[in-house]
Amino acid sequence: MIARVKLSRESAKRIFRNFLLVLTGSAVMGLGYALFLIPYHLVPGGVSGISIIFNYLFKMPVGLLIIALNVPVFLLSYRFLGKKYLLTTMVGMTVSSLFIDLFNEIVRLPRGTENPLLAAIYGGLMLGLGLGLVFRGQASTGGSDVIGLILNKYTGLTVGIGIMLTDFIIISASGLVFRNLEAPLYGYIVLFVSSRVIDLVLEGWSFSKLVFITSARADQIADFIINQLDRSGSALKSRSLYLNREGEIIITVIHRKQLAELKAFIKKTDPQAFVVINDTYEVLGKGFKPIHSS
């Protein structure tokens, strides 16, 4: 009984946290549209991009257009992706659309800059930040991400490629509608910036480095990592394909600021060592982010 109460409390806490993320992300998106994207008719792709084009042609509210145009998308998502995805998409799309019209039609915020390039950059930044928060809240805003998921499911294309193709077609069409060749160029900037910011919000900043080390002096390097860098790691048995010789591979995660120190020690200890360094976006465990907080 106690476990069931605890579980329900954790579920309620998770639902509240997700809704707060969706609400905050939608507000940020709404500001981005009202301050930067709509005043300059910057098309970011997806259903929202089509809505900005229709807003230019018919002077209808962008948020209302997003809701109307998402109806067939919802039908597709229900048909191909299931009921759960439909519900979360409806929540994200409705809340974000209401914020767009709140800031643009009711409050009528002035444009945030007189420079269209700055509008594309900061509009993309706010759009990416808002979408990233919505995605972290386990929701969606509909549009091209639904099309990307459907293409992935039935054609084998990755979700990213499916979304990119959809957005590319919509952004390119804006040049024909606005009769301005610069319009899609600014749209591509918005798409690039927003995509990068979404990745940063979802994956985090790269504060750590994952290092693979193959060396004949693995014991000395391991001792340096443990006692000097105060890091840990793992040693795996390996066999060199070139030399056909048994050895060990050290795998460790260190903070970015420690990388230069480790490289200098390896160079001094074993100049023939083989080192592979990768970015890591999230590390859970002792010395990094606690697992229970993830």
Image (cartoon, rainbow, N blue to C red):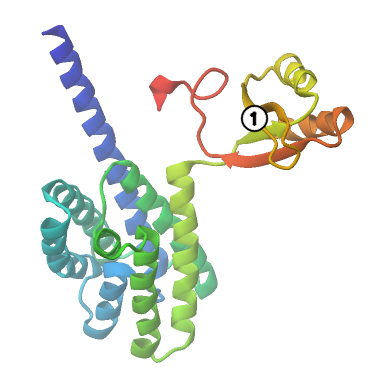
The reply, left or right, for residue 28 in relation to residue 107 is: right
The answer, for residue 112, to whether it is visible in the render is: no
Instruction: Give the quarter of the figure containing the N terminus.
Output: top left
Residue nearest the viewer, comparing 114 with 137: 137
Please, is residue 225 above or below residue 118 in the view? above
Please, is residue 289 above or below residue 267 in the view? above
Instruction: Please name the residue shown 13% across and 51% down the image.
Output: 82
Q: Secondary structure at mark 1?
A: strand
Residue nearest the viewer, comparing 220 with 166: 220
The reply, left or right, for residue 162 in relation to residue 62 is: right
Residue 236 is situated, as x and y percent measured from the top left of the image, at 61, 25
Residue farthest along the right direction in this orientation: 268
Residue 160 is situated, as x and y percent measured from the top left of the image, at 39, 60
Please, is residue 14 above or below residue 127 in the view? above
Residue nearest the viewer, comparing 167 with 182: 167
Examine the image and state in which quarter residue 136 appears.
top left
The amino acid type, in three-letter code, at marker 1 is Ser
Instruction: Please name the residue shown 49% across and 61% down the image.
Output: 193
The answer, for residue 51, to whether it is visible in the render is: yes
Instruction: Please name the residue shown 14% across and 14% down the image.
Output: 5
The reply, left or right, for residue 46 in relation to residue 113 is: left
Q: Residues within 10 Å of mark 1 (few under 14, many from 20)?
A: some
Residue 36 is situated, as x and y percent measured from the top left of the image, at 42, 67
Instruction: Please name the residue shown 68% across and 26% down the image.
Output: 248
Examine the image and state in which quarter residue 272 appears.
top right
Instruction: Give the quarter of the figure containing the C terminus.
Output: top left
Residue nearest the viewer, comparing 140 with 29: 140
Residue farthest along the front direction in this orientation: 244
The reply, left or right, for residue 182 in relation to residue 248 is: left
Identify the residue under disc 1: 238
Examine the image and state in which quarter residue 166 appears.
bottom left
Residue 74 is situated, as x and y percent measured from the top left of the image, at 14, 61
